[in-house]
Amino acid sequence: MKTINDEKGNKGFKIGQITQTLGPLLGLIILIIIVTVLNPSFLDPLNILNLLRQVAINALIAFGMTFVILTGGIDLSVGSILALSSALMANLMLSGLDPILAIIVGCLLGGVMGMVNGLMITKGKMAPFIATLATMTIFRGLTLVYTNGNPITGLGDSMMFQLFGRGYFLGIPVPAITMIIVFIVLWVVLHKTPFGRKTYAIGGNEKASIISGIKVARVKIMIYSLIGMLSALAGAILTSRLNSAQPTAGTSYELDAIAAVVLGGTSLTGGRGRIVGTLIGALIIGILNNGLNLLGVSSFYQMVVKGIVIAIAVLIDRKKTA
C-alpha cells in the first residue's frame, strides 16, 4: 500500500523528468528561432532533410552514450569503433559479401569491441575514462593497420546499400528513419523494462545495486556492447553516404555524442536523464553545425562555439547536482 510520502516522491520524480526534457526543448526552440532569423534559408525543406541525415549519425552514438553515462561511465572509443567496423564492412563488400550481411558483421564487431571495454571496466577494475581512452587508441591504430592508412573505395552500386545512407522513404531520409526506430526501441528498453531500471539504479548508487542483487558487471558489459553496435551502425550509414570507408572516420565523434547527452539533461554523475533529451541534444548539436555553416562561420570558430555550449551545459548540470 502506497503512503502519502511515496506518492509525493513519485510525483516529484515525474515533475523532475518533465523539467529535464522541457529545458533542452526550450533551448532547441530558441536556437531554431535564432538561426532562422539570421538565415531564413535554414527552413528550406532540402536543408532540413540534409540536417536530419547528418543528425542521425551522432544521435545513434549518443543514444548508446546515454546508457553509458546513466551508469556513471564514459566511452571515448566510439569514433574508433565506428572507423574499424566501417573498414571491415567495406572490405567485406569488396570481397563480394552481401551489403546487409556486411553491415550485420560490422555491427557484431562493434559489439565485440564494446564488450572489450565493458570487460576492462568491470573485470579489470579500470576507470571508464582510462579504459576507453586506451581502446580509442588501440582501435584507431588497428584501423590504420587494416587499411594501410588509405580509404576503402569502389564499394559498388548496390541499391540497398546506397539507400541506407543516401536514400529516402516517403520523402524522409532513411538514416533519419533508422534513428527514429532505434530511438523508439531504446526508449522502451530504458523506461519500460527491468534492464532500464537497473541502468538507472547502477548510476544512482552502484553499491546499493550490488547489495540488492543486480548483476552490475553484466549490465555494464551489455551497455558497452550496445554502444559499440550503435557506433558500428552509425559507421554503416556514414560509409553508405560517402560510398567509402575512411580510416580517420569518427574522429571527435565521442565529443559530439557526449555533448548531445549532456545538453539533453543527462547528469554526468549518472542515475538521472532521459533518452528523449539526448535526441533533443543531438538536434541542438546538428542545428549548431548546420546553422554556423549557413552563416559562413569558419570550422575553427565552430569548435569554439560548441566547446562553450558544452561547458555551459556541464556547469548547469553541476549546479543541479550540487
Image (tube, rainbow, N blue to C red):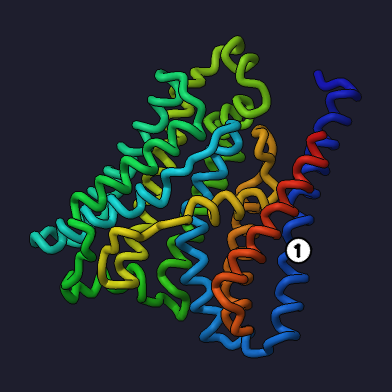
Residue occupying the far right of the picture: 4
Q: Position of residue 285 (x, y in %)?
A: 60, 64
* Rendering quarter of residue 97: bottom left
Horizontal arrangement in the rendering, residue 218 relative to residue 95 (left or right)? right
SS at badge 1: helix
Residue occupying the far left of the picture: 95
Residue 250 visible in the snapshot: yes
Q: Which residue is mark 1?
A: 27
Q: Position of residue 98 (x, y in %)?
A: 15, 60
**Residue at image x 60%, y 10%?**
211
Classed neighbour count for the residue bearing mark 1: other residues with Cα under 10 Å, few (<14), some (14–19), many (≥20): some
**In the depicted structure, whether residue 191 falls above or below residue 58:** above
**Residue at image x 36%, y 60%?**
249
Q: Position of residue 315 (x, y in %)?
A: 76, 47
**Residue at image x 83%, y 43%?**
15
Between 79 and 264, the residue placed more toward the observer is: 79
Between 139 and 173, the residue placed more toward the observer is: 139
Q: Position of residue 192 (x, y in %)?
A: 59, 38
Residue 101 visible in the snapshot: no
Horizontal arrangement in the rendering, residue 155 relative to residue 168 (left or right)? left
Q: Amino acid at mark 1?
A: Gly
